[in-house]
Amino acid sequence: ETGVTQTPRHLVMGMTNKKSLKCEQHLGHNAMYWYKQSAKKPLELMFVYSLEERVENNSVPSRFSPECPNSSHLFLHLHTLQPEDSALYLCASSRLTGGPLGQFFGPGTRLTVL
Amino acid sequence: GQQVMQIPQYQHVQEGEDFTTYCNSSTTLSNIQWYKQRPGGHPVFLIQLVKSGEVKKQKRLTFQFGEAKKNSSLHITATQTTDVGTYFCAGKRDSNYQLIWGAGTKLIIKP
């Protein structure tokens, strides 16, 4: 599947580094999402963008900063992360209206914070 | 707060046996969606149920949405090794962009 792509696929960073995760969707969707998936925990929604406006922010620490420059691209900027932030970060996109509203996920970025 | 409870957490079956996972919401949902995540993979959208009492089938998979639109189930008949993975339900409320995710049920085929 190439509908939603994410880069990088793996990232190892120190607590003082700054890095960015990138997501691109080729499905013509108008909503995009960042999720965090940790072992043995439900999917945690971090941010939702609808028509390029942030509409949900689930009390995510400020060391995570999203950016949505257009409806096809989504970034997650990371700085001064903690080891407990190590997880799989998933991007997803969906339509907002008309037909099944399922979310289509990218392959994820496996993040390790040392 | 808003929750979707999903059980069981794990289910071990012999190949050829059936598998069922259940989701129960504390509030009425506008729709419920089901996803499958293979080991090492990402969630893949399977289906959306919208109507009260709705039943949908995809080959060996049967999805149900309860009359009160608070519960749902996924039943797999005669499991195969390709069915291995974690199955998630996710409910949506009318007034919100968010999906409320269940914790998932991991299907394990016994060797």
Image (cartoon, coloured by chain):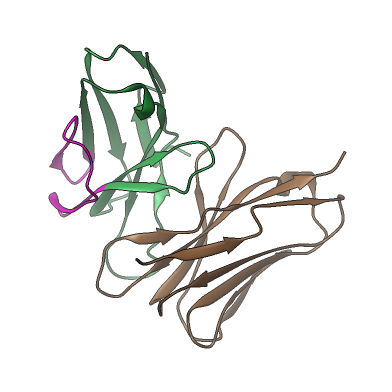
Quadrant location of residue A81? top left
A86 and A74: which is toward the camera: A86
Which residue is pictured at 56% across the width and 53% down the height?
B104
- In the rendered structure, the answer to whether residue B76 lies left or right of residue A37 reads right
Please tell me whether residue B2 is drawn above or below residue A19 in the rendered image.
below
Chain for colour brown? B
Which residue is pictured at 27% across the width and 48% down the height?
A32
Where is residue A52 drawn, in percent x and y? 14, 49
Chain A rendered in what hue? green
Quadrant location of residue A67? top left
Which residue is pictured at 41% across the width and 49% down the height?
A104
Where is residue B78 drawn, in percent x and y? 83, 60
Magenta span: predominant SS is strand
The stretch of residues the image draws in magenta is A47-73
Which residue is pictured at 53% across the width and 88% down the height?
B67
- In the rendered structure, the answer to whether residue A33 lies left or right of residue B73 reads left
